[in-house]
Image: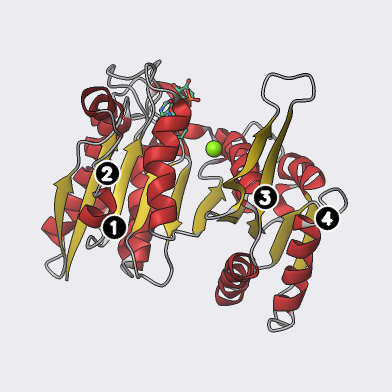
């Protein structure tokens, strides 16, 4: 089968890490005659903005809509306000393509990567499923009496029945399919509309999944447990904002941003899904060739799973564990002195041994 992948390398270290992910896909294509990938690169991002006054073409979604997947590096760079780079590219694609499921694995790949000294790999192995299309990031609100003493700003969370049900149902399905527990993270005691509603839907949908063991935590307690007892969590479902925050805690307990990945999925496959590392463009290390490409390579593993090539997805993940265990080809963020490219080259060697 042939897969068409749209590349948006973006800004800063984005192009550096995407190049290594593409290398992995090309290597798979070489050894597996049943599959081929074609790549089309789109030059969108902050440089494009400075030249053209926009982050991407006006008909960008039209240009992207027939690809099987989008592979994104990162966007954002000093000189362009972050709310423009993020909202006009990333959020536009997530929303425009109804990528309402954000899959963020929080998995410890090697015991030495966690600052939690008493925790082992079996203790930190969860999948956070974050609502990705509405909620607190719906962009709804009002700015009243600007610069007056009675100034008030409203930032409204939007939780539709359709939007809330579909993400919660997706999480129940995942928990059932993989025989894991499901934990909902919310805040029904303080957010007396949105989160009471969320909790109600979590219970309602749960009636259809009596076989799934569930837990429900307030987000503050859940944040504490992420650090003190991460073994409580297997599959987690939560809102857009809470998911954003708890997955950064997740990155902190599993080795940092250089390792964290996230897939933006449109489960119906009506539109392309998007695969990206969680980290940003890292201007502090951009251009130095020292960015860790593992997060971006893990995104490739998620892409392969999404293409139903789970064996390759698994092989990529296993190879990530191997290269970390081997320890000789790691980038400075993991205490090594390899370059982005050296890590990538060693990676494909190890992958072929797999
Ligand atoms: P960042 O993730 O770019 O960097 C935070 C820190 O982590 C930096 O010290 C950086 O060097 C380090 N780091 C990140 N990725 C790394 C990697 N692969 N290897 C080694 N070290 C790595 O976050 P920051 O600095 O808050 O944002 C920089 C820009 O990126 C901003 O313009 C921001 O808006 C944008 N951004 C974009 C995202 C996206 O495109 N999805 C996500 C987060 C931020
Ligand atoms: Mg974030």
Sequence-earlier tag: 3 or 1: 1
- Category of crowding for the residue at label 2, using alpha-carbon neighbours closer than 10 angstroms: few (below 14), some (14–19), many (at least 20): many
Q: Which mark is residue 157?
A: 3
Q: CA distance from mark 3 to mark 1?
A: 29 Å
Image x and y of residue 101, in percent: 50, 60
Q: Secondary structure at mark 4?
A: loop
Report which quarter residue 196 is drawn in: bottom right
Q: Which residue is mark 1?
A: 69
Pick the residue in front: 346 or 137: 137
336 vs 57, left or right, is right
The tag earlier along the polypeptide, 1 or 4, is 1
Coloring scheme used: secondary structure
The answer to whether residue 48 is above or below residue 210 is: above
| Residue at the image point whose x is 53% and y is 52% from the top | 105
Q: Nearer the viewer, residue 74 or 213?
A: 74
Distance (Cα) linking label 1 and label 2? 13 Å
Check whether the beta carbons of the residues at disc 2 and disc 3 lie within 8 A of each other. Answer: no
Residue 79 x %, y %: 37, 16
- Residue 167 placement (x, y as % from top left): 58, 65
Disc with the residue nearer the chain's start (2 vs 3): 2
């Amino acid at each position: 089968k042939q897969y068409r992948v749209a590349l948006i390398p973006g800004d800063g270290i984005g192009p550096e890490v995407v190049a290594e992910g593409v290398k992995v896909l090309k290597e798979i294509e070489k050894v597996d005659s049943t599959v081929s990938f074609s790549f089309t690169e789109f030059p969108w991002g902050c440089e494009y903005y400075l030249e053209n006054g926009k982050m991407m073409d006006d008909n960008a979604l039209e240009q992207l809509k027939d690809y099987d997947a989008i592979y994104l590096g990162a966007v954002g760079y000093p000189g362009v306000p972050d709310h423009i780079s993020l909202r006009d590219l990333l959020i536009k694609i997530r929303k425009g393509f109804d990528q309402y499921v954000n899959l963020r694995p929080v998995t410890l790949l090697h015991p030495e990567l966690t600052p939690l000294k008493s925790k082992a790999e079996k203790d930190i192995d969860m999948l956070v499923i974050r609502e990705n299309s509405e909620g607190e990031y719906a962009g709804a609100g009002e700015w009243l009496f600007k610069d007056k003493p009675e100034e008030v700003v409203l930032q409204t969370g939007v939780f539709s029945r359709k939007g809330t049900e579909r993400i919660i149902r997706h999480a129940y399905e995942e928990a059932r399919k993989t025989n894991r527990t499901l934990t909902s993270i919310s805040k029904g005691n303080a957010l007396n509309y949105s989160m009471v509603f969320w909790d109600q839907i979590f219970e309602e949908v749960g009636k259809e999944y009596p076989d799934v063991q569930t837990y429900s935590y307030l987000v503050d307690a859940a944040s504490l447990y992420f650090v003190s007892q991460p073994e409580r969590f297997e599959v987690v479902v939560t809102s857009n904002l809470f998911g954003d925050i708890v997955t950064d805690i997740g990155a902190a307990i599993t080795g940092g941003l250089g390792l964290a990945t996230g897939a933006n999925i449109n489960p119906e496959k009506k539109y392309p899904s998007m695969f990206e590392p969680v980290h940003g463009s890292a201007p502090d290390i951009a251009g130095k060739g020292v960015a860790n490409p593992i997060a971006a390579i893990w995104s490739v593993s998620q892409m392969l799973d999404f293409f139903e090539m789970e064996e390759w997805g698994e092989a990529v993940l296993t190879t990530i564990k191997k290269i970390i265990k081997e320890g000789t080809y790691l980038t400075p963020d993991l205490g090594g002195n390899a370059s982005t490219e050296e890590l990538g080259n060693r990676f494909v060697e190890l992958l072929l041994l797999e």
